[in-house]
Image (tube, rainbow, N blue to C red):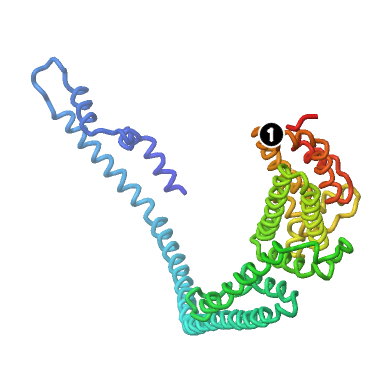
Amino acid sequence: MATTTNAQEDEDTTYIDYEAFLEPTFSPYRFANTLITSTNDPSDPSLDLTTPLSRVLFDLQEIDTHIHSLTTTSALPLLAYTDNSYAASSAVLAAVDAQLDSLRRAYERLQKDVAARSLAASEVLTVVERLHSVTTQLRELSRALVIARQIEIQLSELQSDHKALVRAAQNLRELRVGRVLADVDAGVTLAQDLRRHIFAPAETFILNKAREEVVAFDVSTTTTTTTTMPPPGGEVAAQAALALFLLSKEGEGSLLTSAVQSLLNAAVNASLAALTRSLTALTTLDRSVAEVAARCQNLVALQELLMGIALPSDDDDESSNDDNEAVAAAGSKAKSRSLLDPLLRQLDSASLSSMFFRSVAAGLEPRVREVVGRGGANARILKGAKDRVRGALRACVERGLGSPVEFEVAVMVGAAGVLGR
């Protein structure tokens, strides 16, 4: 402690400005210039460097003496500190080396016990994954073969069992929604053959068969009994309608809508043809009214038939969640939905009969206008029988619907408005 105090006192009593030498901005050239200018007269042409050189040499001697003094007085503490530091670092290094050796041995053991086994396990995993893929595809192919066989049997049963149409459509729907052959690679020959030779022809046949049954629906061969059970004669049309709905994309029943639209268009065109003939031959008006009413009754029977067919459960659950929640919030029971709901939604009509009469009226009005515009005896007879014509058009609605509906009556009677009041 005394030695350290003496060294500090020597440092305090020295005249050398150590701080100036330790500054980062210290410049030896500026320091030398300061010494020269402080020991010489700037106006004296002779320059004497003896004094500044002596000053520098004296300073160097002073610094050397100071360094020697510090080294002499602090040698023992420095040596002791260095010895202690070396001993501590040697102990730490020995402990670290021991831990490194232990870690190295553990790593070698893990590499032997885990890495080698992991490599073998990865090979086994690859084999298992491939076996799983093969098993999955074989299972899908087996299921597809079973469904293909079922479809073949169901198609052969169509002549005796019309319900086979729906069963075949359900099997094809399984394929369409990805429940069959979904995990089978596209390049598998068996899957390609099943799609090309079994599923595609069967779907085409079922679509054509079901469409024919719906388009050919005729109320004269059926008797409507209730709105919840299809009549025996209309059961074929009911199964065909359900098959078309099942094979439609996204559960919207577009195929069923297309078939019903074709039936509706055929009824409208035939009714317009009959009424147009009666405009120039009023003696056939009563027969034309009967034909129009019969076609309307056919559409009403089809509507009741579709109303009695519930939506398939998967489509009904998905499409009616929002409606059911709204009805439940209002405190009333949710109504079970039928095939008629998506059909009328796509046709944008309240009923098939309403759309039928609107279409007939829209097509009949220009034909009445054409007959009146041509003039002649037909025009005079038609104008003279305007009340009879209006009564016949009203009778079309009343006999077709079984009761007068003011909107449809107004639409049909309005088609003859060009005849005057």
* Residue nearer the viewer, 109 or 411: 411
Residue 154 as seen in the image, left or right of residue 16: right
Q: What kind of residue is marked 1?
A: Val
Residue 205: horizontal and vertical position, in percent?
Answer: 62, 72
Residue 173 as seen in the image, left or right of residue 297: left
Toward the right, the furthest residue is 331
Q: Quadrant of residue 216?
A: bottom right
Q: Is residue 97 above or below residue 46?
A: below
Q: Is residue 248 above or below residue 127?
A: above
Q: Which quadrant of the figure contains the C terminus?
A: top right
User: What residue lies at 50% left-to-right and 73% top-to-bottom?
Assistant: 186
Toward the left, the furthest residue is 46
* Residue nearer the viewer, 37 or 240: 240
* Residue nearer the viewer, 31 or 248: 248
Q: Is residue 2 above or below residue 254?
A: above
**Mark 1 = which residue?**
372
Count of marks, rendered view: 1
Q: Is residue 189 above or below residue 210?
A: below
Q: Is residue 353 visible?
A: yes
Q: Quadrant of residue 404?
A: top right
Residue 128: horizontal and vertical position, in percent?
Answer: 54, 83
Q: Is residue 114 visible?
A: no
Q: How many residues crowd around disc 1 within 10 Å: few (fewer than 14), some, or many (20 or more)? A: many
Residue 164: horizontal and vertical position, in percent?
Answer: 72, 76
